[in-house]
């Protein structure tokens, strides 16, 4: 299932039964028809990636987006240590991030980071960066998706 979701710009998460009620409201947001950023990133061990930039298609002053990132391509969590996805626009001095401290879903031992607090200025490009740390060197693919919340 994870492989199919990766190839079709979908998202696949693994969650324990006693936490699925916390995850399912976020997954229902996936009916949003506009994906503005979709990336699959292969990771192993520890490292840092500069990702392709994201540009807000918004025509108003700023827009909010729904950001999802898987943190392991299988369940249950067994090698994930930390991850931090950062977006930054230097000319406007605006930046934010999604990491272990900005989501409660990590506490469930599931495989999804999520936030609805990704605000981007209209027609501005943001650099994207991923820092990660896993306890082993097994290669896995993370899914990063940004959806328009309108």
Image (cartoon, rainbow, N blue to C red):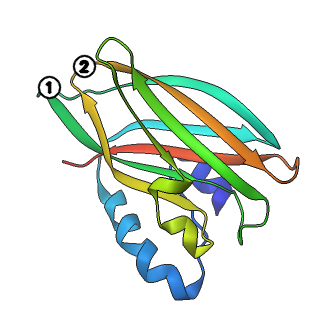
Q: Position of residue 77 (x, y in %)?
A: 72, 67
In this view of the protein, which residue sits in the foreground, 79 or 24?
79
On the picture, is 44 further left or further right than 16?
right
Q: Residues within 10 Å of mark 2 (few under 14, many from 20)?
A: some
Q: Is residue 145 above or below residue 113?
A: above
Q: Residues within 10 Å of mark 1 (few under 14, many from 20)?
A: few
The residue identified by callout 1 is: 59
CB of mark 1 within 8 Å of CB of mark 2?
yes
Q: Position of residue 139 (x, y in %)?
A: 82, 46
Res. 129 mark: none
Q: Is residue 62 above or below residue 107?
A: above
Label 2, secondary structure: give it: loop
In this view of the protein, which residue sits in the foreground, 27 or 136?
136
The total number of labels drawn is 2
The residue identified by callout 2 is: 123
Residue at x 63%, y 72% (from the top left corner): 109
The reply to whether residue 27 is in sight is yes
């Amino acid at each position: 299932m994870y492989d199919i979701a990766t190839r079709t710009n979908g998202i696949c998460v693994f969650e324990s039964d006693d936490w699925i009620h916390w995850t399912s409201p976020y997954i229902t947001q996936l009916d949003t028809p506009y994906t503005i950023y979709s990336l699959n990133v292969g990771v192993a061990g520890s490292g840092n990636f500069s990702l392709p930039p994201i540009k807000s298609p918004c025509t108003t002053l700023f827009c909010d987006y729904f950001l999802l990132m898987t943190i392991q391509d299988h369940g249950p969590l067994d090698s994930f240590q930390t991850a931090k996805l950062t977006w930054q626009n230097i000319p406007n001095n605006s930046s934010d991030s999604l990491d272990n401290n900005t989501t409660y879903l990590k506490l469930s031992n599931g495989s999804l980071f999520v936030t609805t607090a990704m605000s981007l200025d209209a027609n501005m490009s943001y650099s994207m960066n991923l820092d990660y740390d896993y306890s082993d060197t097994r290669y896995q693919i993370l899914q990063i998706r940004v959806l328009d919340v309108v």
